């Protein structure tokens, strides 16, 4: 059984992502983030990797490239969840 702390952390993560989706629906203009701001917020290397893999969707408005803040948050959280699963599997001892 998972600990209460782990469950609370997962619920908090889900509620943050849901709140981001609500904000995106209510005010889509506030959800947009420029490429320069996204590089600062999420890291240049991570953003380039997501863009190269075709996971980070963007739109061009004139010369500016805009990303969805909510979509980048979901990508980052999905990547972290995958890493947790891998490390939890590696760290567990085999059943005797």
Image (cartoon, rainbow, N blue to C red):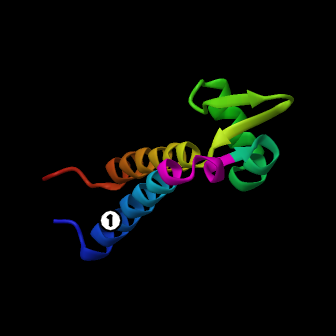
Q: Write down the residue under mark 1.
A: 11
Question: What range is drawn magenta here?
Answer: 24-32
Q: Is residue 25 magenta?
A: yes
| Nearest the eye: 20 or 42 | 20
Q: Using a 10 Å C-alpha cutoff, classify the residue at mark 1 as few (fewer than 14 neighbours), some (14 to 19) or many (20 or more).
A: few
Q: Position of residue 32 (x, y in %)?
A: 66, 46
Magenta stretch mostly in which secondary structure? helix
Question: Which residue extends farthest left?
Answer: 96
Q: Residue at horizontal 39%, vertical 45%? A: 86
Find residue 18 and report its image quarter: bottom left
Choose between 57 and 47: the one closer to the eye.
57
> Which residue is most to the right?
63
Q: Position of residue 57 (x, y in %)?
A: 61, 30
In the image, 80 versus 54, the foreground residue is 54
Q: Residue at x 75, y 28 (%)?
A: 60
- Total number of numbered labels? 1
In the rendered image, residue 92, in percent from the top left (x then y), is placed at 29, 55
In the displayed image of the protein, which residue is found farthest to the front? 26
Quadrant showing the N terminus: bottom left
Q: Residue at x 44, y 55 (%)?
A: 22
Above or below 8: residue 65: above
The one of 27 and 74 positioned closer to us in this rendering: 27
Residue 84 as seen in the image, left or right of residue 28: left
Q: Secondary structure at mark 1?
A: helix
- Residue at point 54%, 48% (across, down): 70
Whether residue 36 appears in magenta in the rendering, the answer is no
């Amino acid at each position: 059984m998972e600990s209460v702390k782990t469950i609370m952390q997962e619920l908090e993560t889900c509620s943050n992502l849901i709140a981001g989706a609500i904000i995106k629906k209510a005010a889509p203009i506030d959800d947009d983030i420029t490429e320069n701001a996204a590089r600062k917020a999420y890291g240049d290397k991570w953003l380039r990797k997501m863009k190269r893999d075709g996971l980070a969707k963007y739109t061009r408005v004139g010369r500016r490239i805009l990303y969805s803040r909510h979509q980048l948050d979901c990508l980052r959280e999905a990547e972290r969840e995958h890493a947790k699963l891998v490390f939890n599997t590696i760290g567990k001892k085999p059943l005797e």
